[in-house]
Image (cartoon, rainbow, N blue to C red):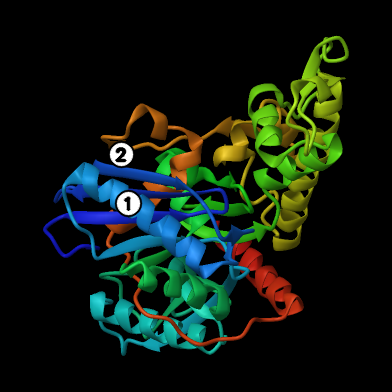
Amino acid sequence: MSSGKGGLVAALDIGSTKICCFIARVDDKALIKVEGIGHQVSEGMRCGAVVDIEAVEASVRAAADAAERMSGETIRRAFVNVSSGFPNSEAIHVEVKIAGHQVDENDIRRALVEARRKAELLEREVLHTIPVTYSIDGSRGIRDPRGMYGDRLGVDIHVVTAATGPLRNLKLCMDRGHLGIAGLCVSSYASGLSCLVEDERQMGVTLIDMGGGTTTIAVFMEDALVYTDVVPIGGQHITNDIARGMLTPIADAERLKTLHGSALRGSSDDREMLTIPQMGEAEQEFSQSVPRSMLSGIIQPRVEEIFEAVHERLIASGFEHAAGKRVVLTGGASQLQGVREVAARILDKQVRLGRPLRVDGLAEATVGPAFSTCAGLLAYAAQGFVRKGNVTTPMLAPSESRSTMARVSQWIRENF
């Protein structure tokens, strides 16, 4: 557990627009009860990566302090999300000899250790090693090999890796804020654990987490994460487009987006007028009046660009059809009016909005899609998946990543 006190865990969602900390207790049935909440405007982050260490450190401290005061607890470590470092999905197959005896936990552990050893040879930071399917003597598609007989145990593993540099910067910010990292989890994986129902994870679903600086993708099948990717565009890019297009301050652009923004043009948008404060002008008399259709005309192309990029990545990975017809949108930017309809049109799938599930004690202000990742980090901690330490690694070339995903999609099609 992140704090070392019976059942106490902490989650820290370090995003481009906000930093959120949850402190919770997990009982022996993995039920989660939040006791402390802190969130702070994010400073020093851009597109999910650290660009100002001191600013991020201050924001992390402020969010953690607020959660500690509310819970009356002091935390030493926290589970942290990852959306920087170009997270990649890799497919690894390993086989170990079992000499004809029944498969037991030790055999599975040996296979997973061998898979992790191979994953570390990829020269990137290993975030997750997730078994997808097993085989015995070449017979594939086995869900649980324990108790079965054979000579060779094989396992296909989905490995999620990231570049080392951005993760080291993240760890440095945590260290300077006097917090250790209990575990790292890809943002979209955490959000999936938080807001997907069991049937969706079993039947196949694509989760799209629309954050401030990035949009992360996670595909789940047979209750396992089988693919993840990141699009370096998010809600903050929409805000910046509004500020540039209407020559208004960033804060006013964010307010316009939140109160009046839509990714679809309405029939009355040309008649509805909005008052736009002008950049550098303090007097109200210099404000400009524009039709709401102008605002929608700025927002819609950027939202379409995000989902077209998601669609391209799903096609390249081979999971566009394998993941089924269900999409769950979450993250703060998913709350923008019209986003759900644009996603359904471009991706040609059924779309719903996802919010944190199976977490008690959340305040009313923190039950929305913007807090799915932080709630999911608690679910990740409750499952006992703890990742410690960092490995020094450079990145794979994009061509290597794409060929790897072709192999992933091939064995998914063979076994599902």
Residue at 49% over, 86% down:
120
The circle on residue 359 is 2
Q: Does dot 1 land on a helix, a strand or a loop?
A: helix
The amino acid type of the residue labelled 2 equals Val
Asked if disc 2 and disc 1 are in contact, CB closer than 8 Å, the reply is yes
Residue at 86% over, 30% down:
297
Identify the residue under disc 1: 378
x, y percent for residue 320: 70, 51
Observer-nearest of 34 and 343: 34
Q: Residue furthest left?
A: 6
Mark 2 Cα-neighbour bin, 10 Å: few <14, some 14–19, many ≥20: some
Gap between marks 2 and 1, in whole Å? 8 Å
Observer-nearest of 208 and 95: 208
The amino acid type of the residue labelled 1 equals Leu
Residue at 34% over, 64% down:
144
Image quarter in which the C terminus is found: bottom right
